[in-house]
Image (spheres, rainbow, N blue to C red):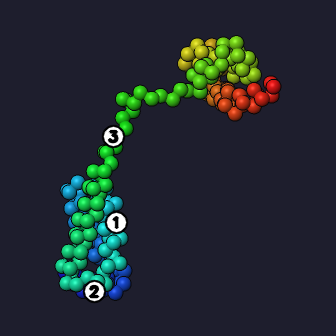
């Protein structure tokens, strides 16, 4: 059995092994107390308690019992602070993707929305022929990779690669920066 009064005295004099013994003995109990009392982050709050307790070890009176009293006094104070802070701020609502109505449009949809049909044809004409065919069949005709590969007589990996390259080229061509630069050149 460890003499916890001696460990407390050794920790007060800077013995790191004694500090570890104290942490291993008290941290689970402090964490449990904070968790049961409603802390949102009992692990983080436990760490904060020990950050505040360790510098005060030299001032502890009463050995192990005095250290436990100090530790739980600090834990209680940190918990009260957390509850007060929570009372001032509303609880954050958990993010639920299925009820979130916000959606970011895909690059394909952005391209279709930002460019008129004849302008889209002009932009698509800037792509190499096979990339253009793949992008048109995959995006505009809504064919699967397999269907596009069969229609063009290509392998599925080739279709995927051409689609990725074609869409990357379209993103670059239709980026706000590219459109601004193109608009400035037309002046």
| Residue 170 visible to the viewer | yes
Q: Nearer the viewer, residue 34 or 6?
A: 34
Picture coordinates of residue 133, whole percent (x, y): 68, 17
Q: Which mark is residue 15?
A: none
Q: In the rendered image of this protein, does residue 46 appear above or below residue 18?
A: above
Q: CA distance from mark 3 to mark 2?
A: 46 Å
Q: Secondary structure at mark 1?
A: helix
Q: Which of label 1 and label 2 is nearer to you? A: 1
In the rendered image, which quarter is residue 76 located in? bottom left
Label count reads 3
| Residue 7 visible to the viewer | no
Quadrant including the N terminus: bottom left
Picture coordinates of residue 104, whole percent (x, y): 51, 29
Residue 105 lies left or right of residue 177; in this view the side is: left
Q: Nearer the viewer, residue 181 or 169?
A: 181
Question: Mark 1 and mark 3 in contact (Cβ < 8 Å)?
Answer: no
Q: Which of label 3 and label 2 is nearer to you? A: 3
Question: Mark 2 and mark 3 in contact (Cβ < 8 Å)?
Answer: no
In the rendered image, which quarter is residue 47 located in? bottom left
Quadrant including the C terminus: top right
Which residue is tagged 3?
93
Which residue is tagged 2?
9
Q: Which mark is residue 48?
A: 1
Earlier-in-chain disc, 3 versus 2: 2
Q: Residue at x 31, y 68 (%)?
A: 49
Picture coordinates of residue 160, whole percent (x, y): 61, 27
Q: Secondary structure at mark 3?
A: loop
Earlier-in-chain disc, 3 versus 1: 1
Q: In the rendered image of this protein, does residue 24 appear above or below residue 111?
A: below
Q: Secondary structure at mark 2?
A: helix
């Amino acid at each position: 059995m460890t003499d916890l009064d001696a460990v407390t005295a050794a920790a007060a004099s800077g013995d790191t092994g004694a500090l570890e013994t104290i942490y291993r003995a008290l941290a689970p109990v402090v964490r449990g107390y904070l968790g049961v009392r409603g802390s949102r982050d009992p692990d983080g709050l436990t760490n904060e308690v020990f950050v505040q307790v360790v510098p005060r070890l030299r001032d502890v009176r009463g050995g192990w019992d005095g250290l436990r009293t100090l530790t739980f006094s600090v834990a209680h104070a940190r918990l009260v602070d957390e509850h007060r802070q929570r009372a001032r701020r509303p609880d954050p609502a958990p993010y639920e993707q299925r009820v979130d109505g916000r959606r970011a449009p895909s690059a394909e949809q952005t391209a279709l929305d930002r460019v008129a049909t004849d302008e889209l044809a002009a932009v698509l004409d800037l792509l190499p022929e096979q990339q253009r065919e793949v992008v048109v069949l995959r995006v505009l005709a809504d064919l699967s990779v397999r269907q596009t590969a069969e229609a063009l007589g290509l392998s599925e990996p080739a279709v995927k690669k051409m689609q990725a390259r074609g869409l990357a080229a379209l993103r670059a061509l239709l980026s706000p920066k590219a459109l601004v630069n193109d608009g400035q050149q037309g002046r």
